[in-house]
Amino acid sequence: MNLFEQNTAANLLPYDGEVIYYGKIFSAVDAKHYLDILLSEIEWKNDEAFIFGKHFITRRKVAWYGDRNFHYTYSKATKHALPWTRELLELKQIAEEKTGANYNSCLLNLYHDGEEGMAYHSDDEKTLVRHAAIASLSFGADRRFLFRHKETKERVTQVLEHGSLLVMKGATQDFWVHRLPKTKKVKSPRVNLTFRKMAQ
């Protein structure tokens, strides 16, 4: 298997940003290997958010890892990065070689089934390097991923497959929001890793 085979995938977005979907970059055996490790060895915690003064705890679980103890705040809740595991470093290197970018942190999400999703949002927190690439690896259940332009409301849909890679870069976060819609059709878990570049 050649993990770093050149991919000529086109930009999914019609304007105001760049999103490249590389498709499956892992064999079925390797994808299952990483999924099993991520499910069992990552320090998962239920995500939390503060909305209109109320504290919410989600069924969806998250984990935050990085080069050092980065503080990452979204939805008014702050996470402190854990040290990389060996497998996360392996996946980071693969994402870096495939996308040509460097990353120093990773936010992981565990969706137990299709009843868990993510609302429209942009990854535009001030602690992230502006316009830096964000590499998204998916393992487990195939799920639909949606983009919506902030002004025109135009939408773009892409199914994220087991063992696949997607990268968002350029002005994407300025002009587009993205979400993972819920679905009753999916009964199995999905793990998503988004490798990011935190400001030093």
Image (cartoon, grey):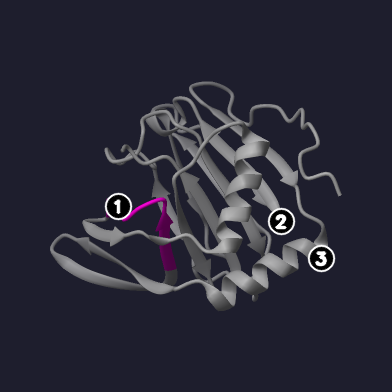
Label 1 to label 3: alpha-carbon separation: 33 Å
Q: Earlier in the sequence, mark 1 or mark 3?
A: 3
> In the rendered structure, which segment of residues is drawn in magenta?
62-74
Q: Quadrant of the C terminus?
A: top left
Q: Quadrant of residue 90?
A: bottom right
Q: Quadrant of residue 135?
A: top right
Amino acid of disc 1: Tyr
- For this view, does 197 lie left or right of residue 141? left
Amino acid of disc 2: Gly
The secondary structure making up most of the magenta span is strand
Residue 191 percent coordinates (x, y): 57, 64
User: Mark 1 Cα within 10 Å, few/some/many (few <14, many 20+)?
Assistant: some
Which SS class for mark 2?
loop
Looking at the image, residue 99 lies above or below residue 37: above
Label 1 to label 2: alpha-carbon separation: 26 Å
Label 2 to label 3: alpha-carbon separation: 10 Å
User: Mark 3 Cα within 10 Å, few/some/many (few <14, many 20+)?
Assistant: few
| Residue 69 painted magenta | yes
Say if residue 186 shows up in the picture.
no
Q: Please, which residue is most extreme toward the left here?
A: 53
Label at residue 171:
none
Which SS class for mark 3?
helix
Residue at 36% x, 41% y is 198
Residue annotated with mark 3: 29
Say if residue 62 shows up in the picture.
yes
Residue annotated with mark 1: 72
Residue annotated with mark 2: 163
Residue 155 percent coordinates (x, y): 54, 37
Amino acid of disc 3: Val
